[in-house]
Image (cartoon, coloured by chain):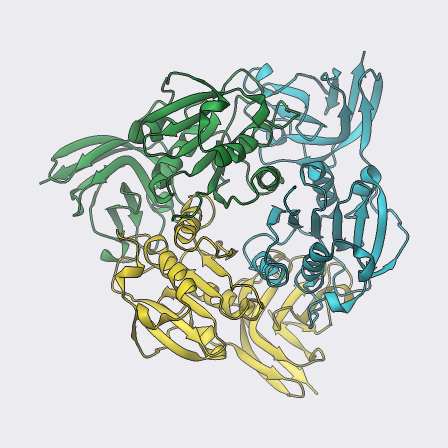
Chain colours: A green, B cyan, C yellow
């Protein structure tokens, strides 16, 4: 029998102010048996796009039944809705309705989408500025116990909010793709919004800032300090520098346009 | 039956050097069933005031019986005492005797205060520089099991050490309060040392750096980039910029004096 | 009966990109009863020496049977081996074969060293860039259950890779030691690669950048702002500034040469 699924937190709260510790306490008080895993709390402040991308990128490494809590919430205290998504692959996200779930829905589909209004599953007092504590954490802890969001509110229809998409390329494709850098990791590796589906690495190159950078299987296939294009561990096409930082060496920032050329 | 209470860690150790991981190991070795929650490890180095404030601010979101471990300890290795506070609302803090507990005591009162000297509850070897590992963590893990600090040492009387207080304003008050900024969070929101007790937001404004900033219920009530005063999720009066940083936009730093004007 | 030992993670992944959360999920899916402790994820990117030092320094505060996962892996995707070390004091490290285990082996010895090749204990899909998720985390979770690495691959012989060693001085020694700064912590305390074995603090001084700095028992024995040498909580000889930063006040960086003079 597989273990009970975890509750997984993603926020832009950082770890300096105690907000995340309080979320852990609220969840623990309601569902003390749940394992709570921190995906990241260092989403750039109020950066819904980055949060949506990281949820999508790591999604399949969390087990069926996982309850994701995603709180990047510039509209807290206004009329934006708290929602619960149940995906076709049987995972859940509880989040403000601001686009956080868009990339996951594009790829994994909607089994149900609920407007979370049942105050029985909120804390008794609701602040205007910290719904991560007052609504989303208790909601997640109750959802983890109940396993089904239908008692949390009424179903609503889905309207996409993010301005960008994940693009897909398959083994054997010949393609010229205009993409963007959508995440740069701690090592300075720059991920594009293009996902590769194939057993072999693609052949071709990425054009960025007037340079052509060829594909290789991994970092160590070029000399230290040299650039390469590769398919990373989340199957995203990425620009990197072996033992260096593409962010700094190539002066790449998020949003940068790239042209990906796949030949066959 | 409520779950067993958690052990909650607050330090200025950061997460780079392994100190926090070692505290987790020491606690786990003594009380493996205890849930350990990290409140924050990013208190500014040796900043007792900030640590005292964050304990106070988040206090009531941790369940009865919670054992807080608070280690900001410029006097480690000297004669400052390790102490255990049992509050009137039945939570515990184990900490060096340097003011860390002052704001919690002001608000939640003393049931008992113990000079923690019983070496049976220390590690067998005591370093001169890391009592977080050698005294406070094992003390917390044993206290969690025993549930009562009376066997940890002799009761002592309480002498306040912090130079500042939390000020309180109530619904219906008309007041002019000279306060200070005592914490600025990751988003650049600047919290004052003034706590609001009321169901409606206060009416009035905050004067800071020659500007008057009016109260609103939440961030989204003003345009992006505009300043507002509000009561935050910890009931503290705060200065913020909608979708921006008051720290940067208003050039506010900790210690800044503010005048809070409440009208009715 | 002592509790089941923990699984302990050390990486250079940071906490911004979700990599560590994914490792927690992989381990939890295989060994849901294991307590997982984060030692640090803020090793400087690809800095094998720093990771090796922090493992060594904190080693003895983790219980017998602990499974350390150490992932600082500039050679990921090339031919460097994944290995499992079983030490003479019955702890384990699973890591890439790049020197991460050297200081622990110097001090705690080899009971067995295994080339981890048994794909039964890998994830089913192996990326070229994230063996922390695909090989080391599932390996650790299985090792935690099985308790013995012999079924994970063939024994191999040990070849040291790090260019530096931990030097040892004992109570009563008279010595002049040419050492180096190998780690600077969050507070700016600068640790040398020299370990002190004695019940009393050493007598003598450290020469660094033309200054002689005397030994004291702890920070509080000198005035705020004054430098001191001391034996820290990991028994390493260290240079510090009371309530200040040796990193900044003395302009020390990692690799700095120091001369430690012990008199008796």
Residue C23 image offset from top left, x and y in percent: 41, 51
Q: Decide which of C211, B40 is in the foreground and name it.
A: B40
Please say whether residue C97 is visible from this viewpoint.
no
Which quarter of the figure is the C terminus of chain C placed in?
A: bottom right
Q: Residue at x 67, y 27 (%)?
A: B232
> As drawn, which residue projects farthest toward the left?
A264
Q: Residue at x 16, y 48 (%)?
A: A200
Q: Is residue C219 above or below residue C127?
A: below
Q: Decide which of A225, B195 is in the foreground and name it.
A: B195
> As drawn, which residue projects farthest toward the right?
B157
Residue C73 image offset from top left, x and y in percent: 36, 59
Q: How many marks?
A: 0
Which quarter of the figure is the N terminus of chain C placed in?
A: bottom right
Q: Residue at x 20, y 40 (%)?
A: A197
Residue B143 image offset from top left, x and y in percent: 73, 56
Q: Decide which of A70, B3 is in the foreground and name it.
A: B3
> As drawn, which residue projects farthest toward the top?
B264
């Amino acid at each position: 029998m597989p273990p009970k699924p975890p509750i997984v937190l993603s926020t832009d709260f950082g770890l300096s102010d105690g907000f995340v510790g309080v979320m852990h306490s609220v969840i623990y008080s309601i569902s003390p048996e749940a394992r709570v895993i921190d995906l990241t709390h260092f989403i750039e402040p109020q950066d819904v796009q980055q949060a949506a991308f990281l949820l999508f990128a790591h999604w399949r490494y969390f087990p069926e039944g996982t309850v994701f809590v995603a709180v990047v919430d510039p509209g807290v205290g206004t009329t934006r809705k708290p929602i619960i998504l149940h995906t076709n692959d049987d995972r859940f996200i509880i989040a403000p309705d601001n686009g956080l779930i868009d990339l996951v829905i594009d790829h994994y589909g909607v089994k149900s989408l609920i407007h979370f209004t049942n105050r029985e599953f909120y804390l008794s007092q609701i602040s205007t500025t910290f719904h991560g504590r007052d609504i989303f954490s208790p909601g997640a802890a109750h959802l983890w116990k109940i396993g089904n969001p239908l008692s949390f509110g009424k179903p609503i229809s889905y309207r996409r909010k993010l301005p960008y998409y994940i693009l897909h390329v398959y083994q054997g494709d010949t393609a010229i793709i205009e993409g963007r850098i959508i995440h740069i990791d701690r090592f300075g590796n720059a991920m594009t919004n293009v996902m590769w589906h194939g057993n072999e690495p693609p052949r071709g190159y990425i054009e960025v800032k007037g340079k052509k950078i060829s594909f290789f299987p991994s970092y160590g296939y070029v000399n230290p300090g040299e650039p390469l294009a590769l398919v990373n561990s989340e199957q995203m096409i990425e620009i990197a520098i072996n033992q260096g930082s593409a962010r700094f060496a190539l002066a790449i920032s998020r949003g940068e346009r790239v042209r990906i050329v796949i030949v066959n």
